[in-house]
Amino acid sequence: MNDGNRIPVLGFGTYAPEEVLKSQAKDATKLAIELGFRHIDSAQSYQNEVEVGQAIREMIAKGVVTREEIFYTGKLLPNKNSSEMVRLCLQESLKDLQLDYMDLFLIHFPVRLPPRDSFSPMDEAGKTMCLNTDLCAMWEVMEACKDAGLVKSIGVSNFNRRQLELILNKPGLKYKPVCNQVECHIYLNQSKLLEFCKSKDIVLVAYGVLGSTRDKAWIDQNSPVLLEDPVLLQIGKKYNKSPAQIALRHQLQRGIVALAKSFNAERIKQNLQIFDFHLVPEDMKIIDRLNRNMRYVCMKMCVDHPEYPFHDEY
């Protein structure tokens, strides 16, 4: 990354719908580490950092890994998107995780929500209540957290080009964002944003690579199931790989860090088995043509906010 630190190209995502027991996040994270994952991605909004932290510490205690071998990513809760709350949120997460530092801390979403218990509090008209967001002021506190040793690297998530440039052009900028974590998959290949990020030495980290969790609270239930795409199935047969393995390999070959999310033991194992084959250029182009600029995660409750990131082309 542009600060000299290194990020594993394949990460284990820990988000799950509310109905999934938090204990499953702990068990799945332990298994992921045991099988070989070293990059663990979570967030305060997932409400499972206690369990994920327990998993990491137990695997360290067993001698499976050292703390230095684990790359942990956390994220700033959108309800705490203010310069006054950045450091507090980071410290809360570290306390829940029982870790001394994070490897990477991200501004999770560029929209600021009111400081309430609900992730997306509604007003009387049923609309999400959003507050003004000063991204540059927040970034200065992120930089201070890095200087204080609370986190090794700092970045953003769900930012568009305009919002990235706002940070990059900030007077007195000390550290550039090392990454921008965004939804990216065969139906939303983010080619223009990827090109821009590469030009600024910013790593693109992809979530949703395998599609979505089909969470009814967030996802249109009529949206296509990514892993059932016939092209992925066909190419998978050619390489004797699963559609998920093809989808992950495709992102890695584009120079993208990919997050794989599953609580199924066999699928967690399969998601690691993507370093023993290479997609030929012809197959890469075939998969590229599947793009339809379709999002699974639209965050429509924030669509009226001036910093809603998805109105821009990229």
Image (cartoon, helix red, strand yellow):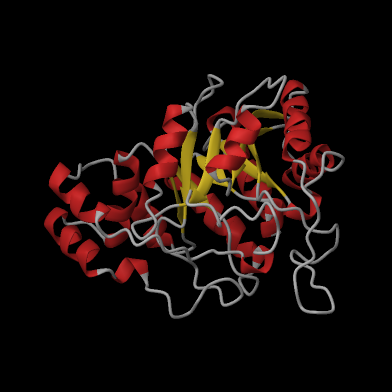
For residue 3, what is the image quadrant? top right
Nearer-the-camera pick, 302 or 79: 302
For residue 236, what is the image quadrant? bottom left
Judge left or right: residue 123 versus residue 254.
right
Q: Is residue 257 visible?
A: no
Judge left or right: residue 57 versus residue 161.
right
Which residue sits at x=65%, y=51%?
Answer: 109
Residue 187 in the image, given as x and y percentages of width and height: 36, 60
Which residue sits at x=48%, y=66%?
Answer: 296
Which residue sits at x=24%, y=55%?
Answer: 287
Residue 243 in the image, given as x and y percentages of width and height: 28, 61
Q: Is residue 255 visible?
A: yes
Q: Is residue 59 above or below residue 301?
A: above
Judge left or right: residue 310 versus residue 137.
left
Q: Is residue 38 above or below residue 45?
A: above
Residue 295 in the image, given as x and y percentages of width and height: 47, 63
Give the number of callouts: 0
Which residue sits at x=72%, y=27%?
Answer: 143
Nearer-the-camera pick, 271 or 137: 137
Residue 72 in the image, given as x and y percentages of width and height: 60, 39
